[in-house]
Image (cartoon, helix red, strand yellow):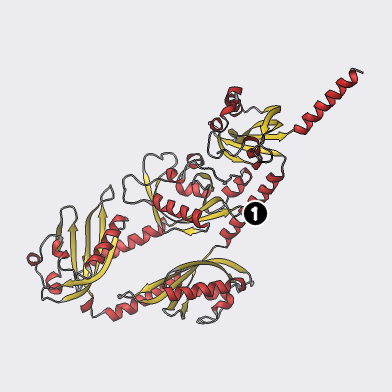
C-alpha cells in the first residue's frame, strides 16, 4: 500500500452520513472511508461491509457478465481525478448489487448509476480524498429499455409497408426472414439464404465495417437494442438506404445468443416528411415535460428554443431566445461564452457548472449544463440540445465539507496532542496527525495494522494492550514514556517524553476503534529532574 495524505476526520461522520445524496469518501488509494446512509440504502449494503475496502472490491464486476466491466471504467475515472486534480463525470454504468443486506450472497440486482468523482484538495493543492457522487438511474433506464423493446416488438408484429422482419440465431448462424422480403427487397427466402453471410454479402462494402463495429460495440457492452442505417443490395442490383433495428437477447452468462428486428426501406418511405414533422413535435414535447430547463440551437450556435422551465425560472419573456447571457452570473459569463464558442467550432459536447439568476428573488443558483451535438445521416452537425440540472445543494454540501475539513485540520494542527485513530479488531490505522510523523518518522500509516506500523513495540506488549482496550473497553494511560524523536526533521534524534492515552471509541454502544493520544511532557520531566537534583545538592550542604 502506498503512503497517502488522505484523512478521515471522525467529527464529520454524523454530518456526512446524514446528507441526502448518494456519496462515498475515498482516499487516494481508492479505499472507502465512509458512506452516506442514503448510499448504503440504495446499494443494499451496510457500512461495515464496505468501509475499509477498496471500492473495486466492495462493488466488483458481475462474474456472470465478464464483458461488462464497470469497475474498470470507475478506476479510469478515479485515476483521471488523481492525474488532473479535477472532477470527472462517468457515463451511465451497470452494476450488480445484492438484493438485500440480509442475503448479500444469494442474488444480484441489476442497477444503473450515473457518477461523478470530485477531488477534495488540501491547502497545498494535494488530493486529501475523493468524493464519489452517484445518481441511481435504474428506474429511468429500465423504463427506456422497456419502451424501446415494446416499440421493437410492435414494429416486428405489424405488417406495415416497407418493413422486413427478421430473426437471427447467433449461436447456430441461422437467419430467418419474415414477410415483406419479396415486396421490398425483391428476394424470396430461398434466393437470399438462411445464414448470416446472406446479410453480410449484401451490405454495401463502404458501410459494412461501421455497421459491424456498431453491432460488436452493442453486444460487448450488453446493450439490449441496436439500430443502424446502411445501404442494402436489392435483387434488381440497386442499393436501398435502410434503417435496421434489432433487439438483442443474452444468455445468463451475458453472451448474445439471438437477435430479432426489422428493416425499413427509407428510400421508399413516402411518409418520411410527415414522420419527421411528428418526430420534431414529439422532441419538443419531450423537452417541455423534462423536470429541468432545456434549450436547442442550430449548428451555428443560434438559440432556437427554451422550454417553459427556463422562462419560469429566469423571468425572460416567453419565446425570447436572445439576451440569455444576462441571467448568467457576471463572474461566470466570460467562461460560459468561451466554452460555448469553442463547442460550436469543435462540435464537441461539454458539461459546465455556473450560476443562473432566479427571477423570483434575484438570487443565483448553481446549475450543471450539458450540451450535446446532434448529427444528420451524413455526420454533419445539425442541432445542439442542452439541459440544466440544479446542483445548488450539492455545491453547498461540498463547500460545507471542505470548510469543516479545513477547520478541523487547523484545530488539530494547533493541538499539543498527537492523535492516531485505529479501527476494528485488527487495529487498522485510519487517521494520524502530523505530530505522529515527528515521533515515529515517515512511515506508511494509513490502511496498515498497528502491529505492522510499530514492530519495535511488540516486545513491550503493545498488541496485548490494544486488544485489552478494544475487547474490554478499558482506558489505559502511560506516563512519561521515553522516545527518541527527529524533532527538526534533520536526521538527529533527541530524547523526549510523552504521556499516552488509549481510549475506546464507541458506536451504537459497541467498541468500533481506539483513539491514541500522545502529549509531550519533555519539559515537565526535565524540570522535575532539575528540581530533584537541586534538592539533592541542598541536602548535602
Tell how many labels. 1
Task: Give the image location of residue 251, x and y in percent.
Answer: 25, 49
Q: Does residue 113 appear anywhere in the picture?
A: yes
Task: Give the image location of residue 317, x and y in percent.
Answer: 55, 81
Q: Residue at x 72, y 40 (%)?
A: 416
Look at the numbered disc 1 and give the secondary structure of its residue: helix
Between 489 and 238, the one nearer to me in the picture: 489
The C terminus: image quadrant: top right
Outermost residue to the top: 540
Image quadrant assignment for residue 462:
top right
Between 115 and 251, the one nearer to me in the picture: 115
Q: Residue at x 58, y 33 (%)?
A: 510
Q: Is residue 489 left or right of residue 290?
A: right
Circle 1 residues within 10 Å: few <14, some 14–19, many ≥20: few
Q: Up-down: is 447 above or below 478?
A: below
Q: Does residue 111 appear anywhere in the picture?
A: no
Task: Give the image location of residue 333, x and y in percent.
Answer: 57, 74
Q: Which residue is mark 1?
A: 403
Between 16 and 477, the one nearer to me in the picture: 477
Between 531 and 45, the one nearer to me in the picture: 531
Q: Is residue 247 left or right of residue 462?
A: left
Q: Residue at x 58, y 24 (%)?
A: 464
Q: Is residue 258 left or right of residue 136?
A: left
Q: Up-down: is 432 above or below 324?
A: above
Q: Up-down: is 494 above or below 93?
A: above
Image quadrant assignment for residue 102:
top left
Task: Give the image location of residue 286, x and y in percent.
Answer: 41, 71
Outermost residue to the left: 190
Amino acid at each position: 500500500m502506498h503512503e497517502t495524505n488522505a484523512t478521515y476526520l471522525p467529527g464529520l461522520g454524523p454530518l456526512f452520513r446524514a446528507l441526502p445524496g448518494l456519496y462515498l469518501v475515498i482516499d487516494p488509494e481508492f479505499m472507502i472511508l465512509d458512506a452516506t446512509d442514503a448510499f448504503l440504502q440504495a446499494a443494499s449494503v451496510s457500512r461495515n461491509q464496505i468501509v475499509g475496502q477498496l471500492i473495486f472490491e466492495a462493488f466488483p464486476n458481475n462474474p456472470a457478465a465478464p464483458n461488462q466491466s464497470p469497475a474498470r471504467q470507475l478506476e479510469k475515472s478515479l485515476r483521471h481525478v488523481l492525474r488532473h486534480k479535477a472532477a470527472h463525470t462517468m457515463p451511465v454504468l451497470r452494476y450488480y448489487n445484492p438484493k438485500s443486506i440480509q442475503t448479500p450472497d444469494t442474488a444480484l440486482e441489476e442497477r444503473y448509476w450515473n457518477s461523478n468523482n470530485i477531488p477534495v484538495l488540501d491547502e497545498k493543492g494535494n488530493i486529501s480524498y475523493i468524493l464519489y457522487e452517484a445518481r441511481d438511474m435504474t428506474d429511468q433506464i429500465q423504463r427506456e429499455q422497456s419502451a424501446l423493446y415494446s416499440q421493437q416488438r410492435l414494429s416486428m408484429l405489424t405488417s406495415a409497408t416497407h418493413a422486413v422482419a427478421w430473426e437471427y440465431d447467433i449461436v447456430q448462424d441461422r437467419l430467418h426472414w419474415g414477410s415483406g422480403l419479396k415486396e421490398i427487397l425483391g428476394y424470396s427466402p430461398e434466393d437470399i439464404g438462411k445464414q448470416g453471410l446472406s446479410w453480410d454479402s449484401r451490405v454495401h462494402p463502404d458501410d459494412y465495417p461501421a455497421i459491424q463495429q456498431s453491432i460488436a460495440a452493442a453486444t460487448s457492452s450488453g446493450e439490449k437494442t441496436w439500430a443502424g442505417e446502411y445501404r442494402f443490395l436489392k435483387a434488381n442490383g440497386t442499393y436501398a438506404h435502410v434503417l435496421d433495428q434489432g433487439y438483442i437477447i443474452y444468455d445468463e452468462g451475458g453472451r448474445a445468443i439471438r437477435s430479432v428486428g426489422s428493416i425499413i426501406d427509407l428510400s421508399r418511405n413516402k411518409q418520411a416528411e410527415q414522420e419527421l414533422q411528428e418526430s420534431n413535435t414529439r422532441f419538443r414535447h419531450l423537452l417541455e415535460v423534462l423536470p429541468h430547463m432545456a434549450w436547442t440551437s442550430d449548428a451555428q450556435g443560434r438559440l432556437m428554443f427554451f422550454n417553459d422551465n427556463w422562462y419560469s425560472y429566469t423571468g425572460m419573456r416567453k419565446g425570447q431566445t436572445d439576451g440569455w447571457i444576462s441571467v448568467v452570473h457576471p463572474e461566470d459569463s466570460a467562461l460560459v461564452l468561451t466554452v460555448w464558442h469553442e463547442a460550436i467550432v469543435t462540435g464537441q459536447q461539454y458539461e459546465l457548472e455556473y450560476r443562473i439568476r432566479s427571477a423570483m428573488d434575484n438570487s443565483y443558483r448553481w446549475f450543471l449544463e450539458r450540451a450535446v451535438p446532434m448529427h444528420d445521416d451524413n455526420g454533419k452537425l445539425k442541432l445542439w440540445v442542452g439541459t440544466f440540472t440544479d446542483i445548488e445543494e450539492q455545491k453547498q454540501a461540498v463547500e460545507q465539507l471542505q470548510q469543516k475539513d479545513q477547520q478541523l485540520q487547523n484545530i488539530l494542527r494547533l493541538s499539543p496532542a498527537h492523535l492516531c485513530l485505529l479501527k476494528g479488531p485488527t487495529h487498522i490505522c485510519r487517521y494520524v496527525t502530523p505530530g505522529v510523523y515527528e515521533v515515529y518518522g515517515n512511515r506508511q500509516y494509513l490502511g496498515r495494522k498497528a502491529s505492522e506500523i510499530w514492530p519495535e513495540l511488540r516486545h513491550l506488549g503493545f498488541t496485548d494492550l490494544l486488544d485489552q482496550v478494544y475487547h474490554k473497553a478499558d482506558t489505559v494511560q502511560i506516563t512519561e514514556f521515553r522516545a527518541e524523536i527527529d524533532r527538526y526533521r534533520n536526521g538527529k534524534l533527541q530524547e523526549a517524553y510523552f504521556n499516552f492515552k488509549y481510549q475506546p471509541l464507541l458506536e451504537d454502544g459497541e467498541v468500533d476503534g481506539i483513539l491514541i493520544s500522545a502529549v509531550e511532557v519533555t519539559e515537565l520531566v526535565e524540570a522535575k529532574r532539575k528540581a530533584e537534583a537541586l534538592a539533592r545538592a541542598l541536602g548535602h550542604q
